[in-house]
Image (cartoon, rainbow, N blue to C red):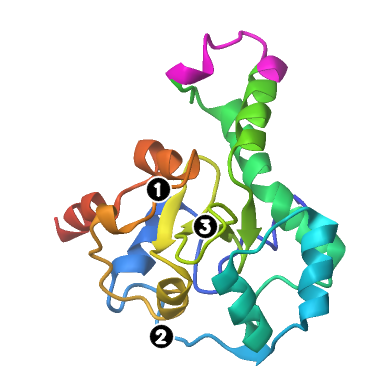
Amino acid sequence: MSEYDGFIQSPVGGVNAANLCKMAISSQGECGQAMTVQWTKGYSQDELDRAQERFGLIFPPDLVALLREKRPVEGHDWNDEPAIRRALDFPLAMLLSSIERNPHWWPEWGERPSDMQARKEVVRDVVARAPKLVPLIAHRYLPEEPHEAGNPVFSVFGFDTIYYGTDLDDYFEREYAPSDFRVPLSRFKHIRFWSDLVARYGCSLEELQKKLDR
């Protein structure tokens, strides 16, 4: 078993991009009865400050405001250092795993090395220069950049990465209550690398809706 086996299981279904997208845009879907996010007491400002310092992150202001007020029961616990480090490592780990199994390579990365380890080093460098991702629930992430409110939420599973909300509020409305997600891509703030990953290998909401309508 992988160290991520428990982590990657979404509370409402499987982890592949098709299933995630279906859940995001279906009014009922295959997930059964709709659920609601369960909340518990938020963190103190000292706890959030320590978490940001410990993990080298800057939480966007809307995330700070949310976590001060309340936090999702199913969310990652910022006082659990080993679990948070696994969550922080997950996006890169899944991309490296995908590189092993698939011929994914972007032209701007230069000539594709023949050696697998060399390819992985290129991807590591690309991800290291991309905005850091702040884990929310399972494999849902909020980019820390830009350091402002209103960043989109991503569902990250290697190259099968999709948008899961235009911002935090939109995301939490959708996570446990699938609904019609016909949102123009122009409404999503562009995030370096991660938005490009959605556009190239994920499924845009509009394209997905067409597929599911067939």
Q: Residues within 10 Å of mark 2 (few under 14, many from 20)?
A: some
Instruction: Give the residue at mark 1.
Output: 190
Q: Secondary structure at mark 1?
A: loop
Residue at image coords 27%, 77%: 27
Q: Secondary structure at mark 2?
A: loop
Q: Nearer the viewer, residue 214 or 108?
A: 108
Q: Give the spatial CA distance, label 1 vs label 3.
A: 24 Å
Residue at image coords 80%, 56%: 55
Of the numbered discs 2 and 3, the one sitting upstream in the chain is 3
Instruction: Give the residue at mark 3.
Output: 15
Residue 72 % position (x, y)? 62, 81
The amino acid beneath tag 1 is His
Q: Residue furthest left?
A: 214
* Residue bounds of the magenta highlight: 107-118
Instruction: Give the residue at mark 2.
Output: 34
The amino acid beneath tag 3 is Val
The amino acid beneath tag 2 is Ala
Residue 51 % position (x, y)? 80, 66
Mark 1 or 2, closer to the camera: 1
Q: Give the spatial CA distance, label 2 vs label 3.
A: 18 Å
Residue 1 % position (x, y)? 76, 51
